[in-house]
Image (cartoon, helix red, strand yellow):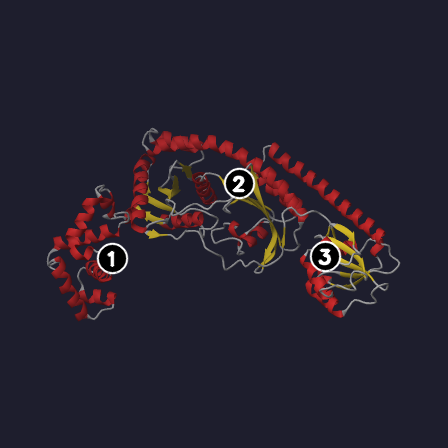
């Protein structure tokens, strides 16, 4: 019997908030590098900010008023002369800082009439910030630059819009022709040329498309936990990167109405993702929502049918062995082998659930999907069904069923992130005949109840490891149990006295070592005589337990009762 830690993580030291980020609704435009290729800017000279040449220009503006800052807009190519620069109150380096903070794409200046040269401090500041600073020739006309830049931007946006609609129709046809999420992400990956995944709202991967090696390498980055779950709690929408993760990734939510169905994520190592990629993902997310809703409708009918039959099997009403095996075969389940019955049950909420602007699918439904996803990857012929309060899985016993169940539970629970609930799990003995599945089911249910009483939330308990706790857990009269503890342990039963707690531990070690004083002293790190003194003190409180085997049995049972939760 063990305890698995799967409570929600409180933070991630692995994913610092490094790297750039592009909002999910980015609009297409020209980069500064491309804008410098238009005829009107052919003679412009780049004074500073070379590393900012990939900034996006979405508009152009001419500004010759004394105070230009209130009129500056993000992603703008600002054209000006020395007139508004000559008496800048904050100084030209300060002006560059303010322009960069407002999201300016580039600053282009024509000199000589009011200002002969730009100061070195201004050039150095622009270079430090990566803000492109262009020096325009005298002969160029601002109106020519304005017209040609806006024409380029409009052409770029029109092309992006046309491509977006083409992609939308291509993806929509995938679903209309009967394809699911796997076909959708494969098509999206082919369009973008990068790996793409669809996950649940808490990050469990539902489908993936793209190069297998690329997908595997991304799974080993800190964007995923050790169970393979994409850490959605650290991944906001849009394009972003992390300091310790090479490349870029774009995340778009899959939302239908106000229900959050998950995320669609694209990964790229060898190129930066941009707003056009996000637009494609948004189209794919819309179609994915349609595919998810279609699959949910089909799954709801299938799950009810499968659940009704498994419920009959687990209650012993499904008929003889041959009928059970044959019907399970028709459902894609293999129950004609050695199995263990696993019951997983969500733990009661420890506090108020976190609220967000979107609704999640019912928690029990998401819990069932998580189990089906994990088990399905390991063994597609294993039965996994969600009932009203629990998930039941019939897993192949294999050479080490305990290790297999632990691994499944680890993958379902992950690191506890993504807003997922903790759960307790019970495992039956090996079932070698389908007719004995009802017995295995009851064993697994008992293991869930007793395991949670023993170890609290997130426990994993095997029926064979419960021992006498199986009998104690069936005593419904809690007052009787409390009375037995008080009458047997006397003052040692106090749970708010550190000295009594210490003596209880000494008593437990003595009983566990079958009153071997030397071994108990070694485990407790006591001197032999110190332990002898403690034994005398315990006997004065409890009676002659060193010579009375019946008393020792009562004391051992009383200590076990104290271990059980929920008696207070």
* Residue 261: mark: 2
The local crowd at label 1, few if under 14, some if 14 to 19, many if 20 or more residues have their Cα within 10 Å, is: few
The disc, 1 or 3, on the residue closer to the chain's N-terminal end is 3
- Secondary structure of the residue carrying tag 1 is loop
- Secondary structure of the residue carrying tag 3 is helix
Going by the picture, which residue comes out furthest to the right?
Answer: 139
The local crowd at label 3, few if under 14, some if 14 to 19, many if 20 or more residues have their Cα within 10 Å, is: few
The disc, 1 or 2, on the residue closer to the chain's N-terminal end is 2
The part of the image, by quadrant, that contains residue 187 is: top right
In depth, the one of 250 and 123 nearer the eye is: 123
Q: Along the horizontal axis of the image, is 170 left or right of 106?
A: left
Q: CA distance from mark 1 to mark 2?
A: 47 Å
Q: Along the horizontal axis of the image, is 145 left or right of 421?
A: right
Q: Nearer the viewer, mark 1 or mark 3?
A: 3
What residue does disc 3 label?
A: 69
Q: Is residue 356 above or below residue 333?
A: below
What residue does disc 1 label?
A: 496
Q: Along the horizontal axis of the image, is 67 left or right of 417?
A: right
């Amino acid at each position: 019997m063990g305890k698995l830690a799967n409570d929600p993580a409180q933070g991630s030291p692995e994913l610092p908030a490094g790297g750039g980020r592009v909002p999910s609704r980015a609009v297409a435009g020209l980069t500064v590098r491309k804008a410098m290729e238009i005829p009107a800017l052919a003679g412009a000279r780049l004074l500073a900010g070379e590393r900012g040449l990939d900034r996006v220009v979405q508009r152009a503006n001419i500004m010759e008023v004394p105070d230009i800052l209130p009129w500056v807009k993000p992603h703008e190519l600002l054209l000006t002369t020395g007139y508004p620069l000559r008496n800048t109150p904050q100084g030209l380096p300060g002006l560059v800082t303010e322009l960069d903070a407002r999201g300016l794409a580039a600053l282009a200046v024509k000199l000589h009439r009011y200002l002969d040269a730009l100061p070195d401090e201004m050039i150095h500041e622009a270079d430090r910030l990566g803000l492109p600073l262009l020096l325009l020739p005298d002969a160029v006309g601002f109106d020519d630059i304005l017209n040609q830049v806006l024409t380029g931007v409009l052409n770029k946006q029109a092309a992006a819009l046309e491509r977006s609609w083409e992609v939308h129709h291509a993806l929509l046809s995938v679903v209309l022709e009967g394809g699911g999420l796997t076909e959708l992400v494969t098509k999206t990956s082919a369009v973008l040329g990068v790996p793409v995944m669809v996950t649940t709202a808490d990050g469990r991967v539902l489908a993936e498309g793209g190069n297998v090696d690329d997908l595997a390498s991304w799974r080993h980055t800190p964007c995923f936990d050790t169970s393979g779950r994409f850490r959605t709690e650290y991944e906001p929408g849009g394009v972003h990167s992390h300091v310790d993760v090479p490349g870029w990734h774009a995340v778009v939510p899959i939302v239908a109405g106000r229900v959050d169905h998950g995320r669609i994520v694209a990964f790229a190592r060898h190129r930066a993702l941009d707003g056009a990629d996000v637009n494609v993902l948004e189209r794919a997310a819309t179609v994915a929502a349609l595919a998810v809703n279609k699959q949910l409708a089909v799954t709801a009918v299938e799950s009810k049918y499968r659940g009704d039959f498994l419920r009959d099997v687990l209650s012993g009403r499904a008929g003889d062995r041959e009928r059970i095996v044959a019907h399970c075969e028709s459902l894609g389940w293999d129950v004609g082998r050695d199995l263990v019955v696993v019951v997983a049950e969500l733990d009661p909420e420890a506090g108020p659930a976190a609220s967000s602007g979107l609704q999640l699918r019912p928690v029990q439904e998401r819990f069932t999907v998580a189990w089906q996803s994990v088990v399905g990857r390991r063994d597609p012929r294993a039965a996994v069904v969600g009932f009203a309060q629990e998930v039941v899985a019939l897993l192949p016993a294999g050479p080490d069923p305990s290790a297999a169940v632990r691994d499944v539970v680890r993958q379902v629970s992950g690191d506890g992130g993504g807003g997922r609930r903790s759960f307790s799990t019970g495992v039956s003995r090996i079932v070698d005949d389908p007719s004995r599945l009802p017995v295995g089911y009851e064993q697994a249910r008992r293991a869930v109840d007793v395991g949670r009483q023993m170890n609290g939330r997130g426990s994993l308990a095997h029926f064979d490891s419960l021992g006498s706790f199986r009998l104690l857990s069936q005593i419904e009269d809690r007052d009787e149990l409390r009375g037995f503890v008080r009458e047997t342990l006397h003052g040692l039963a106090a749970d708010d006295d550190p000295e009594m707690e210490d003596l209880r531990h000494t008593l437990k070690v003595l009983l566990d070592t079958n009153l071997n004083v030397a071994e108990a002293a070694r485990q407790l790190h006591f001197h032999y005589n110190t332990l002898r003194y403690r034994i005398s003190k315990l006997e004065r409180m409890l009676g002659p337990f060193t010579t009375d085997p019946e008393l020792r049995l009562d004391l051992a049972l009383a200590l076990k009762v104290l271990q059980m939760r929920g008696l207070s």
